[in-house]
Every structure is written in structure tokens, then in C-alpha cells.
Image: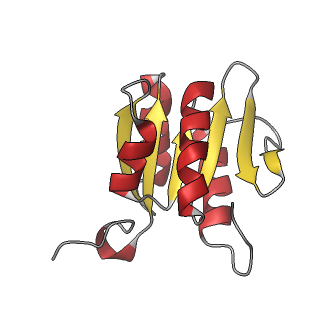
Amino acid sequence: MIAEPGTGSGGRPLVAVLCRVQLLSEAILGALGEIADVRVFPAGIGDTAGLLRSLKPDAIVVDDETEAEAARAFLGQSGSTALLHVSLRDERLLVLTENGWQDETDGGISPESVRNVLVGHLFARGTSRV
């Protein structure tokens, strides 16, 4: 059976990870592998919005400001996708909300903190996303 776009196998959320730092993408894949289907792409491959339109992910994780802005443009059309920006330079975990970027760093960044923030946004009930 082929899963619908935007859902992973077994109805699990589909998460797109676009990272410049390969070690970060591998860590996120490890942290999310049991709860989501994760598709990893290198940052900077071009036409991020088109890639995301084709993939229709439930959440997007990026580690690059350029990719964050390109993913944000995609969200203008999608509305239901969570966007996390892991800023390694600033050691911050940012989530795009209706009011702009919200810092959810709470104690540093780690693969587990990325997982926890994603779980909160993917499985939250009654909250609106961008």
C-alpha cells in the first residue's frame, strides 16, 4: 500500500529535514525514527518550496536561515506544517508560529529536544499552526 502524500508509513507523520550539517540530520533521524517517517535532504539543493510541495510533510526541520525562509514561503501555501529552525550558531531551537519565530530552546538543543518540540506541535490538539 502506498501512503498518501504528507503521511508516512502506518499513518505516522512525515518529517522533512534539510540540513547543512550532516551529523545533525543523522541525529534527528535517530531521535525521530521510531515516531515519524523522516526524509533527509542536503540544504542548498535549490527549489526548497517545490520539493516541499511535492513531499507535503507534516513537519520541516532546517539548520540554515536560507532554507528556513524558503520553507516559510512553502508554509504560506500549506498552513498545516510545523517548521523548526535549529540554529547551531545561536544554539537556539526556533518554531514558526502565527506571531513569527518562537524560541523553544529551554535548556539547550539536542536531538531529543528537537523531537520533543516536534511531538508537541505534531500531536497538539486544538492549536493552530502557521
Q: Camera-side residue: 101 or 1? A: 101
Query: In the rendering, at what x and y percent does residue 54 appear?
Result: 33, 54
Which quarter of the picture shows residue 1?
bottom left
Residue 34 shown left or right of residue 79 in the figure: left
Residue 18 shown left or right of residue 2 in the figure: right
Residue 15 shown left or right of residue 4 in the figure: right
Residue shown at the point (63%, 45%) measured from the top left: 84
Q: Camera-side residue: 50 or 94? A: 50
Query: In the rendering, at what x and y percent does residue 47 appear?
Result: 39, 34
Query: In the rendering, at what x and y percent does residue 39 appear?
Result: 35, 47
Q: Determine whether 37 is above or below 68 in the image.
A: below
Q: Determine whether 11 is above or below 76 in the image.
A: below
Residue shown at the point (58%, 66%) measured from the top left: 80
Task: Inspect this view and state whether residue 88 appears.
Answer: yes
Quarter of the image containing the C terminus?
A: bottom right
Residue shown at the point (61%, 62%) measured from the top left: 119
